[in-house]
Amino acid sequence: MKVTIHDVAAKAGVSIKTVSRVMNNEPSVKQATIDKVNQAMQELHYQPNAAARNLASTKSYSIGYIYDNPNAYYVIDMQRGLLDACRKHGYELLIHPTNAKSSGIVQEVIDLVQHSRLAGLVLTPPFSEMPEIAEALSSINVDFVRIISGSTPSPKQTNCVLVDDFTAAFKITNHLLELGHSQIAFLCGDEEHSSSGERLAGFKAALTKRGIETNSKFIVPGSYSFESGVKGATQLLALPNKPTAIFACNDEIAAGALFSARLQHIEIPQQLSIVGFENSPFSRQTWPPLTTAHQPNSTIAQSAAELLFKHTRPGGQSHTEDQPVFIPELLVRESTAPVGSES
């Protein structure tokens, strides 16, 4: 026989309403009561049904994640972090892939929220960087948290999780500089993503600090894809004055650059150092493995969901101080070496 909320209430010696308040993570419940209810649910092996709660209550127990990102590894990591947080708090996750460049994207997002009765949304780039999406969600009083590229909390951007791409890119570039490289090229990601601009800015800042002028021919526009890395590296390696190192805006681009170099019989890292960004499986599946910056996407997503739940609970409020900042960490692997290390 299926265990019900009535059984939990009887086991814990509290009212059904109290059990409901504990499951909803309402802040006013005493810790002793929370422990007692959780103990009862554990002993009875009770599993709350989020779908049933949605139907029986005016409060929703589902959140949404919309994305438009060609990097499957990024999307999977985000989903994993969001699901971990949802399971912890008894929520369901609705995943909705879509086209951010669609002319009707704002209405599509509104329809998704209203038709699915979502409690809130977690927005990742490019949606998190589209002011029209934020304005539309605010106009219908829907809670949302944005994961955005940046290092400084902004009073105008509440409920954000920040990824400090600038600082991480500065450290990656500085690693190459310390190896003696001064002819360093940069393969860009999609322009509409703030992370692309932040990583490029960090790259330029590191060069400037060492008194090195940025070579415009070494900055190659592109997108976050393997093919873009192949094309960009092929262009760079055809220059009379070739770079000795390439900083790719993500690991997928870096893997493409490495592939292009291999086709031209260029030894990595003896003749050319290559670095990526994010520490996706691309960085570990190449040979040699790529030096990169570890971006903990699952943890970032979990942090965003926790922040969303904090503000969707009764009495929750938005605060600019609730903006955790993640700085991707430099991981040195075999794809980088001192300049002139060719034997």
Image (cartoon, grey):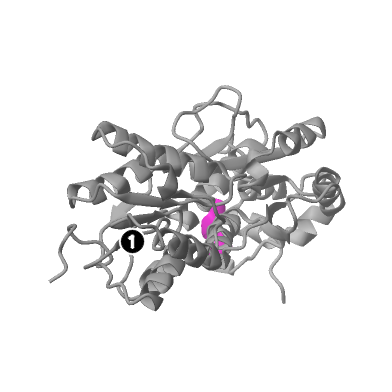
Rendered position, 174 above or below 258:
above
Q: Quadrant of the N terminus?
A: bottom right
Task: Give how far across and how far down residue 36 sits, in percent.
Answer: 52, 52
Which residue is at the far front?
A: 240
Task: Give how far across and how far down residue 40 sits, in percent.
Answer: 56, 60
Label 1 crowd (10 A; few <14 / some 14-19 / many >=20): many
The number of discs equals 1
| Front residue (pair 131, 178) | 178
Say which element carries label 1.
Answer: strand
Residue 218 part of the magenta segment: no
- Give the residue at x 59% y 68%: 44
Rendered position, 234 above or below 37:
below
- Give the residue at x 61% y 48%: 124
Magenta stretch: give its range: 36-42
Residue type highlighted by circle 1: Ile
Q: Quadrant of the C terminus?
A: bottom left
Location of mark 1 (residue)? 274
Which residue is at the far top?
A: 155
**Most frequent secondary structure within the magenta stretch:** helix
Residue 37 part of the magenta segment: yes
Q: Is residue 209 visible?
A: yes
Task: Give how far across and how far down residue 186 sits, in percent.
Answer: 41, 50
Asked where in the image residue 225 lies, by quadrant, the reply is bottom right
- Give the residue at x 69% y 38%: 130
| Front residue (pair 286, 33) | 286
Asked where in the image residue 201 lies, by quadrant, the reply is top left
Q: Is residue 316 left or right of residue 206?
A: right
| Front residue (pair 283, 234) | 234
